[in-house]
Image: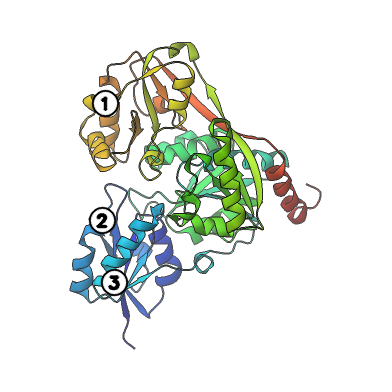
């Protein structure tokens, strides 16, 4: 039987997972290559032979997605599997049209087909868009679980941008582990808050291996989603965070709408800074799309350190990179805090260095702030030089990590942290119901 030649379209995350689960040991298919977009420094690498399995002894090349039409025609590819997240429907169909015009099928896998079943209970935290507040929601749930005496592992959506073979299965229990595994700023933003709270973190490339390792030492798995992707594991409780600042996106972005339709509980975050009319419209949309899911209401509580350093001053705001790029937000916690404190926000563009400038060029919708990009040592250096070159009196840091651990900020600065503040008991009660079922007496 002739093998079906396919290409997996990805961004160094969902694409590798779909390959591992569906295609790695499937002799009916020949995975010609991966294509990549969204994330820098991925193209030109190989998915290594040690992870590719016996059907791919030489590994699998990763090409830039712009080469897709040529790759389809050159290799007589029959199917292209779209495998990345936070894509609006217009762009998604643009991709489909490119593939179909090259006489190949454009394929989207079923959600549950690529979810791995765990031997331990799983709570998943996903979202409709990047930047909705998954991380703060996950931290609150982890705190609930720890207070019940449960040992929890937060398994984070993949961000394998370095040596893929070395990143097969990574365990983080201390800040030193971030250095050991040579984490990017994006990785540190996701792992560090968990570690600071005493939560064990797992991540990497092979999520079956990761799950089996985590199951050996914890009572419950907490899936900490990335972008607006769905869970890699079959959840016992599916929590989906939605954003009242982007009403309508819950049915306009892939695979965010998949999450909406799979949710058991919605968490409407950031209500403290949202228009009540938008909150009401969002509730209406969610009930129409998934009438069975419960709806929890929450604020994003800003905690400002060293407030006197920035109040009323001319400031540079630094925000989480993916929230601005993939998430298309023009502001984050730093901007919100700066405006509340009467600051004058400086546009950093005149002073940014090359790789940071490239980010602004690629994502022109970024507001008057600095994205905390750091996918390589060179980019981290460009970030540091850019921050220190901006003509301002102080710096407002809205990233989830202590950025001063990564770069030397030579101006006075204030770190902005944010926690999820429940306005009702819907989320906590639903979590408790699951715990009572899975761990009687907790």
Q: Nearer the viewer, mark 2 or mark 1?
A: 1
In this picture, residue 339 sits left or right of residue 163: right
In this picture, residue 117 sits left or right of residue 398: right
Q: x and y percent of residue 137 in the render?
A: 58, 41
Query: In which image quadrant can residue 309 be found?
Result: top left
* Nearest to N terminus: mark 2 or mark 1: 2
Q: How many marks?
A: 3
Q: x and y percent of residue 351 in the render?
A: 23, 24
Q: x and y percent of residue 210 in the render?
A: 50, 56
Q: Nearer the viewer, mark 3 or mark 1?
A: 3
Residue assigned mark 1: 386
Residue 1: which numbered mark, if any? none
Q: Judge whether residue 323 can be spotted in this image.
A: yes
Q: What residue appears at the point 41 percent right and 32 percent down from the top-left corner?
A: 331
Q: For mark 1, does the 10 Å Cα neighbourhood hold few (<14), some (14 to 19), or many (20 or more) residues? A: many
Q: Which quadrant would the N terminus be assigned to in this image?
A: bottom left
Q: What residue appears at the point 31 percent right and 72 percent down from the top-left corner?
A: 6
Residue assigned mark 3: 100
Inter-mark Cα distance, 2 to 1: 28 Å
Q: x and y percent of residue 299 in the render?
A: 60, 33
Residue assigned mark 2: 45
Inter-mark Cα distance, 3 to 1: 43 Å
């Amino acid at each position: 039987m002739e093998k079906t030649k396919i290409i997996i379209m990805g961004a160094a995350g969902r694409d590798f997972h779909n390959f591992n689960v569906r295609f790695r040991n499937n002799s009916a298919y020949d995975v010609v290559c991966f294509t990549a977009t969204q994330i820098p420094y991925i193209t030109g690498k190989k998915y290594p032979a040690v992870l590719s399995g016996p059907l791919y002894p030489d590994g699998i090349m990763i090409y830039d997605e712009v080469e897709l039409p040529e790759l389809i025609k050159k290799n007589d590819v029959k199917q292209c599997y779209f495998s990345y997240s936070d894509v609006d429907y217009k762009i998604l169909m643009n991709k489909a049209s490119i593939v179909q015009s090259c006489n190949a099928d454009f394929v989207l896998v079923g959600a549950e087909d690529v979810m791995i079943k765990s031997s331990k209970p799983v709570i998943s935290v996903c979202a409709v868009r990047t930047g909705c507040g998954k991380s703060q929601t996950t931290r609150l749930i982890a705190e609930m679980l720890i207070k019940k005496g449960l040992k929890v592992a937060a398994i984070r959506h993949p961000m394998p941008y370095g040596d893929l073979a070395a990143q097969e299965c990574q365990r983080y229990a201390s800040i030193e582990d971030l250095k050991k595994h040579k984490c990017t700023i994006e990785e540190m933003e996701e792992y560090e808050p968990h570690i600071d709270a005493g939560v064990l973190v797992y991540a990497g490339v092979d999520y079956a291996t990761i799950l089996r390792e985590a199951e050996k030492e914890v009572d419950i798995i907490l899936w900490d989603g990335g972008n607006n992707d769905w869970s890699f594991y079959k959840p016992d409780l599916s929590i989906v965070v939605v954003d009242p600042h982007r009403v309508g996106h819950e049915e306009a972005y892939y695979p965010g709408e998949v999450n909406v339709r799979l949710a058991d509980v919605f968490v409407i975050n950031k209500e403290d800074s949202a228009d009540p009319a938008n909150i009401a419209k969002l509730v209406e949309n969610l009930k129409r799309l998934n009438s069975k899911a419960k709806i929890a209401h929450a604020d994003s509580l800003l905690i400002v350190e060293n407030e006197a350093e920035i109040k009323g001053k001319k400031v540079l705001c630094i925000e989480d990179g993916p929230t601005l790029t993939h998430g298309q937000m023009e502001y984050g916690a730093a901007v919100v805090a700066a405006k509340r404190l009467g600051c004058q926000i400086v546009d950093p563009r005149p002073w940014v260095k090359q790789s940071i400038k490239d980010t602004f060029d690629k994502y022109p919708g970024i507001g008057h702030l600095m994205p905390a990009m750091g996918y390589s040592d060179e980019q981290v250096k460009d970030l540091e030089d850019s921050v220190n070159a901006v003509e301002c009196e102080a710096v407002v840091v809205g990233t989830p990590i202590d950025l001063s651990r990564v770069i030397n900020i030579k101006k006075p600065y204030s770190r902005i942290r944010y926690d999820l503040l429940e306005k009702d008991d819907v989320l906590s009660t639903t979590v408790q119901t699951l715990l009572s079922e899975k761990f009687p007496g907790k």
